[in-house]
Image: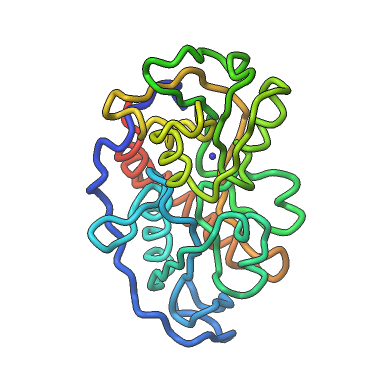
Amino acid sequence: MFSKKTAMLAALAAGTLALSACGGGSDEPGAEGEAGGLSLVNEGALTVCSDIPYPPFEFEENGEYTGFDMDLMKEIATGLELELEVQDVGFDGLQSGAVIAAGQCDVGASAMTITPEREENLTFSDPYYDSLQSLLVPADSDVKTVDDLAGKSVGVQQGTTGETYTRENVPADTKVVAFPSDAEMYAAIQAGNVDALLQDLPVNIGHTEDGKFTIAEEYKTDEQYGFAFAKEGSEELVSAVNEQLTELRDNGKYQEIYDTYFAE
């Protein structure tokens, strides 16, 4: 799902993702070559579901999807000799396994932490990112630690590990407000409707660029992100994606993409 201080979004324009036209659903094997024999939602394509935007992991720029997850998915699809198709879905349906179980996509790539609860309904790839949680507050806020949220309000994204961490660690009289996505959370703190946001560090860092907000605290939670697949019947695809992740690490492409979004 790492250095404690990152300078994020330094190169948002890098790594664009070309979207292909969506083909008809099929249970037939995918493209020949490395992808031969894989059971895919759409023949010849790797169909990815993601909750967009969630920069720097997935966001839209100039009509195309990009970000850390999206750039990795693009490389993985290329390595499998497949086209890449992306569907924007809600995170709650994705992390619960409902979207993938419905056959809407082959893989979920959405900054998703691997947890035992999610593994009840999903199969995960090897971990591809280690994450921290963090507390974002206005630059002039008197909130310095999670304990200072007593009697205040904090925004979280519904269904995330950030929400779980918040509810388990804030004072009892803190008002926890759950939002569907980061976009609504950020709008709420900008409008003064919540006093803080608690979520993944890289996402919060993106909100500090104009100097109006700052990171009050970071929390080491030992979270790791993984790509999500159907609980049953996805073994060959999971293995193929893991092989591609290993190849990307070995050939230096993973590090290149990582440095684009998480430069020291």
Residue 189, above or below 49: above
Q: Position of residue 140 (x, y in %)?
A: 38, 15
| Residue 255 % position (x, y) | 36, 39
**The quarter of the displayed image where residue 203 is located:** top left
Question: In front: 117, or 152?
Answer: 152
Position in image of residue 220 (x %, y %): 58, 23
Whether residue 152 sits left or right of residue 49 in the image: it is right
> Where residue 234 sits: x, y (%)?
65, 67
Toward the viewer: 86 or 127?
86
Of the 4 image quadrants, the one containing the N terminus is top right
Indicate the quadrant containing the C terminus: top left, top right, bottom left or bottom right.
Answer: top left
Instruction: Decide if residue 177 is on the left or right side of residue 187.
Output: right
Name the residue rendered at 42%, 67% in the picture.
Answer: 86
In the displayed structure, would residue 204 be above or below residue 233?
A: above
The residue at 27%/52% (across/down) is 15
- Nearest the camera: 155 or 49? 155
Q: Residue at x 50, y 26 (%)?
A: 195
Q: How is the image coloured?
A: rainbow
Which quadrant of the structure image shows residue 44?
A: bottom left
Give the residue drawn at x 29%, y 23%. Answer: 211
Q: How many marks?
A: 0
